[in-house]
Image: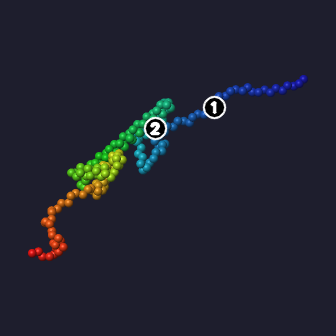
Amino acid sequence: MTQETTTEQAPQTEQAPQVEKPPEYVPLTPESLKFPEASEGFVMDETVRDEFLGLVNDQTLTADARAQGLVDLYLKTAKQAAETGSTAWAETQTQWQDQTKADPEIGGDKLEAVLVTVSRAIDKFGSPELREAMDLTGAGNHPAVIKFMYKMAKQFNEGTPVSGSPSGGAVSLADKMFPSMAKG
């Protein structure tokens, strides 16, 4: 009789893959974020910061809703930044215009003539691109630029007729040759 060896194997049971538990959710706080310092020219708008934190910490939002909220927040802050820059530029231009009008050298009653002189100089020595650049940047409103251009323009102005009185009459050739000779 032959002996059969049978090896009994333990029945295999399929085990469910073990899923690691995600770490416990800890919401972000203002202190957990790193922003540039105010000394670097950055000032944090706390309202925007809090709205941002509200979006990223809201566990009830879907990923799509959270992403759309962040896009909307970005667009809102970009629009506010553009409006702030435009307002500051307009205020600066108004301030420069007021300073120019009040300047004792070029302002007041002299301003119109000064601007005409400067405009003629730009037309004569400049180019349409120069005028466009001055309009685009607002440099043409700054009193120092106007003073500089006015001083330059005066150097190139055409001369005016010389005033004087006609001479006392015709001088003879003898008088021209011997002016110190006594007449008489």
Quadrant in which the N terminus is drawn: top right
Give the residue pinned by disc 2.
53
Residue located at (51% from left, 37% from top): 26
**Marks 1, 2: nearer the viewer:** 2
Q: Position of residue 151 (x, y in %)?
A: 28, 56
Q: CA distance from mark 1 to mark 2?
A: 33 Å
Give the residue pinned by disc 1.
18
Quadrant in which the C terminus is drawn: bottom left
Specify the amino acid type for callout 1: Gln
Task: Report the front residue among 124 and 138.
Answer: 124
Q: Position of residue 2 (x, y in %)?
A: 89, 24
Q: Position of residue 11 (x, y in %)?
A: 73, 26
How packed mark 2 is, by other alpha carbons closer than 10 Å (few <14, some 14-19, many 20 or more), is some
Task: Report the front residue among 37 and 139.
Answer: 139
When asked about the image quadrant of residue 104, the answer is: bottom left
Instruction: Tell me the number on the disc at residue 1.
Output: none
Q: Position of residue 41 (x, y in %)?
A: 41, 48
Residue located at (45% from left, 35% from top): 71
Specify the amino acid type for callout 2: Leu
